[in-house]
Amino acid sequence: MKKFLMLACAAFFFSCSSNDDESSNGGGGGNNNNTVAYIQGKMDGTAFDYTFNNTATDTYLYNPISGFSGLGFDRWYYYGGMTTAFNSSFTPSFTIAWNNMYFGEGGDESGETAAFHTTVGTLPSNFLTQAQDDNHMPGIEIGYEAANGNYYSSKEGIQTGSALSVSNYSPGTTAGTKTMTVTGTFSCKLYNDEDPTDVIDVTNGKFKLILSEFN
């Protein structure tokens, strides 16, 4: 199955605005409202803070990610956000994504665009296994790439006791592209994709992400 990924340039969202009048319940995150995006928490008890503020002193960048898994001409679209270190290797990086959120029969690019705010207006809270993702079940995938290049994923092992909750949705548009800013909290286990005995326990996680339509 082919999987296509699109990273939108972080600069695209420097002026991103949202319509707070359309937001659902408030809350989520503890950062200043001027913060563009962040993923924060503790990994094995050690705090991490991957925050993008759109300032000259930023050490992390943010990119919305959108793409699809394809089978023939059909597409299952996913949406998420990635924070990456601003260095030559762009590591460490942290990604939160919601997979298989919109089914586009024959591609259905116009339908994906039209439905975007509804599609991501209520995001699922279940963590996906690899088999569930292959079967196009909607759900969460969290990934982490360490500075040494090791990659860890929530899909590689059990997630008993893990949780993710979105507490605020704020739809908007930037340069004609539909966006959804989401804030919330999470905890999970991340498994080395080459050594399942190497596990990172993520606790006290929180995020603010700007999701973007694919087209």
Image (tube, rainbow, N blue to C red):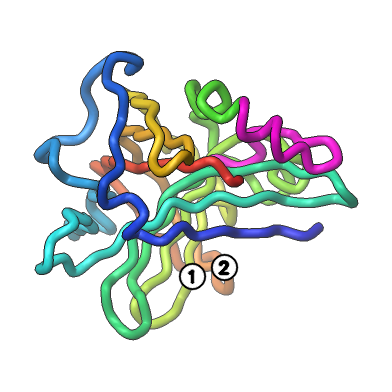
Along the line of sight, the residue nearer the viewer: 38 or 203: 38
Rounded to the nearest angstrom, the CA distance separating label 1 from label 2 is: 6 Å
**Residue 9 image position (x, y, % from top left):** 41, 61
Q: Residues within 10 Å of mark 1 (few under 14, many from 20)?
A: some
Q: Amino acid at mark 2?
A: Asp
Tell me what residue is drawn at x 9 percent, y 39 percent: 32
Quarter assignment of residue 108: top right
Q: Amino acid at mark 1?
A: Tyr
Of the image marks 1 and 2, the number of the one nearer the N terminus: 1
**Residue 184 image position (x, y, % from top left):** 31, 32
Along the line of sight, the residue nearer the viewer: 28 or 169: 169
Secondary structure at numbered mark 2: loop
Tag 1–tag 2 contact (CB < 8 Å):
yes
Q: Residues within 10 Å of mark 2 (few under 14, many from 20)?
A: some
Tell me what residue is drawn at x 55 percent, y 65 percent: 196
For residue 193, the mark is 2
Q: Is residue 105 magenta?
A: yes
**Above or below, comparing residue 209 to residue 183 in the picture:** below
Q: Is residue 1 magenta?
A: no
**Residue 153 image position (x, y, % from top left):** 51, 58
For residue 203, the mark is none
Quarter assignment of residue 100: top right
Left-right relation of 156 to 131: left
Extent of the magenta region: 98-114
User: Could you tell me which quadrant the N terminus lies in?
Assistant: bottom right
Note whether residue 163 is visible: no
Tell me what residue is drawn at x 44 percent, y 80 percent: 149
Tell me what residue is drawn at x 34 percent, y 78 percent: 147
User: Could you tell me which quadrant the C terminus lies in?
Assistant: top right
For residue 151, the mark is 1
Note whether residue 198 is visible: yes
